[in-house]
Amino acid sequence: MKTFELTGTKRSEIGKKATKALRNAEEIPAVIYGGDAKEATAFFVKANEVRKLIYTPEIFLVNLTLDGKVTKAILKDIQFHPVTDNVLHLDFLHVLEKKPIVIDVPVVLDGLAEGVRAGGKLSLDLRKLKVKAMYDKVPEKLHINVEKLALGKSVQVGELSFEGLELLNAKNAVVCRVQLTRAARGLAAKNAE
């Protein structure tokens, strides 16, 4: 997993007025929870510093510096404004050495499926899978080999297994499938005659 360096400043004032003043100064309110602390810690970060963390399909382990103390964390949730699409709030989760984390990992399909060679179309239904694992076992991407995937067949979550990871999606959820195209149906009907 890649790392991302981020510096935050603890918030002394909490409330609508203080939050609005932060957002007007192009700073994003945030919170980190979990870990040894019983309560969440409120802080803020500069909007331009988190752009590469937010607008990417990759996952990062964040080295978050608050008051000179570095904490390992992952970005758990992002709240966007419904109209302007500005970032309103960030939630970080404290990462511990001995406690597993739950995170969405991007899926990558490897190989050319048999069904595609036969005229089908490969579609990726789940772009990310929710996994539970120790933070150092989480890969940057989950690679799925689809070379043996025939026409009209699919790969479900229950058929997949990755070392050191527990998949939390529904077992019958379809990750990818090879669909029959109109051209392939027409060719099959023509050959049947």
Image (cartoon, grey):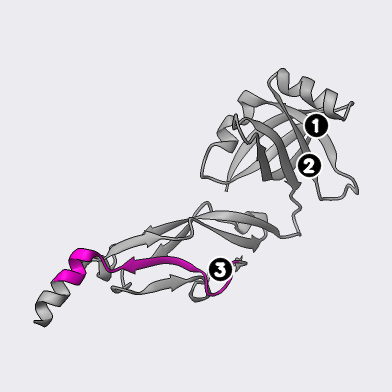
The answer to whether residue 150 is seen in the rendering is yes
Query: 65 above or below 120?
Result: above
Disc ID at residue 122:
none
Q: Nearer the viewer, mark 3 or mark 1?
A: 1
Mark 3–mark 1 Cα distance, whole angstroms, equals: 36 Å
Give neighbour class at mark 2: few <14, some 14-19, many 20+ (Cα, 10 Å): many
Disc ID at residue 163:
3
Give neighbour class at mark 1: few <14, some 14-19, many 20+ (Cα, 10 Å): many
Among the two numbered marks 3 and 1 on one chain, the one whose residue lies closer to the N terminus: 1
Residues at circles 1 and 2 in contact by the CB criterion of under 8 Å = yes
Query: 175 above or below 48?
Result: below
Residue 145, given in percent of the width and then of the height, sits at 38, 66
Residue 111: quarter of image: bottom left
Looking at numbered disc 3 in the image, what kind of residue is underneath it?
Glu
Residue at 84% from the left image edge and 23% from the top image edge: 17
Query: 88 above or below 170?
Result: above
Q: Nearer the viewer, mark 2 or mark 3?
A: 2
Query: 102 above or below 48?
Result: below
Looking at numbered disc 2 in the image, what kind of residue is underneath it?
Ile
Residue 56, given in percent of the width and then of the height, sits at 52, 40
Q: Determine the residue located farthest toward the bottom in the rendered image.
A: 192
Kindly identify which residue carries mark 1. 43
Residue at 48% from the left image edge and 76% from the top image edge: 159
The answer to whether residue 118 is seen in the rendering is no
Q: Which residues are magenta?
A: 169-186
Kindly identify which residue carries mark 2. 32
Say which of 25 and 11 sits in front. Answer: 25
